Amino acid sequence: MPVKIKTKIMNSSLLPCLTYGCQTWKFTAKSKQKINTCQRGLERSMLSIKKLDKVRHTKIRSITKATNALSYALKLKWKWAGHIARLTDRRWTVRATMWKGPEGKRAKRETSDTVGGRDQKNSRPKLGSSSKG
């Protein structure tokens, strides 16, 4: 199958599957790297290139001429943000997007030493002492 047809299939089917729901993702460095890694793996598979062949991704991209998945996902996120910004009513999507979360600091987490506000170390009977007289 020609590379041009494989690229069309990738851009029309695999790219939307890879970026499904990306409008709500938080794009961290790790998530960006995962998107790039996945797309590069798909492109290597299209051309039957193994990682051991040591072919640079820029050369592979110039052959396939595929759409960059990361820039596609970021573009979709900006489109979604523009859509949300234009909404004038009080739908849950607007409220959830604009929500800043609770104010103040979070409560400290209870450790295994304290349960329910009492100290567990002091409430245990001491070893070696018996209640029998």
Image (cartoon, rainbow, N blue to C red):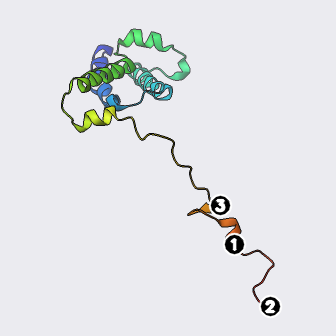
User: Circle 2 sits in a helix, a strand or a loop, which is it?
Assistant: loop
Q: Earlier in the sequence, mark 2 or mark 3?
A: 3
Closer to the camera in the image, 97 or 35? 97
For marks 1 and 3, give the CA distance. 11 Å
Where's residue 45, x and y in %? 41, 24
User: Circle 3 sits in a helix, a strand or a loop, which is it?
Assistant: loop
From the image, tell me which residue sits under label 3. 113
Q: Earlier in the sequence, mark 1 or mark 3?
A: 3
Closer to the camera in the image, 9 or 104? 104
Which amino acid, by three-letter code, is at mark 2? Gly
Name the quadrant containing residue 132: bottom right
What is the number of the mark on residue 133?
2
Q: Is residue 82 left or right of residue 60?
A: left
Closer to the camera in the image, 74 or 119? 119
Disc 1 crowd rating (10 Å Cα; few below 14, some 14-19, many 20+) is few
Contact between labelled residues 3 and 1, with CB atoms less than 8 Å apart: no
For marks 2 and 3, give the CA distance. 30 Å
Which amino acid, by three-letter code, is at mark 1? Arg
Where's residue 16, x and y in %? 29, 27
Answer above or below: position of 118 versus 88. below
Can residue 9 be spotted in the picture?
no
Answer above or below: position of 107 versus 62. below
Which amino acid, by three-letter code, is at mark 3? Asp
What is the number of the mark on residue 124?
1
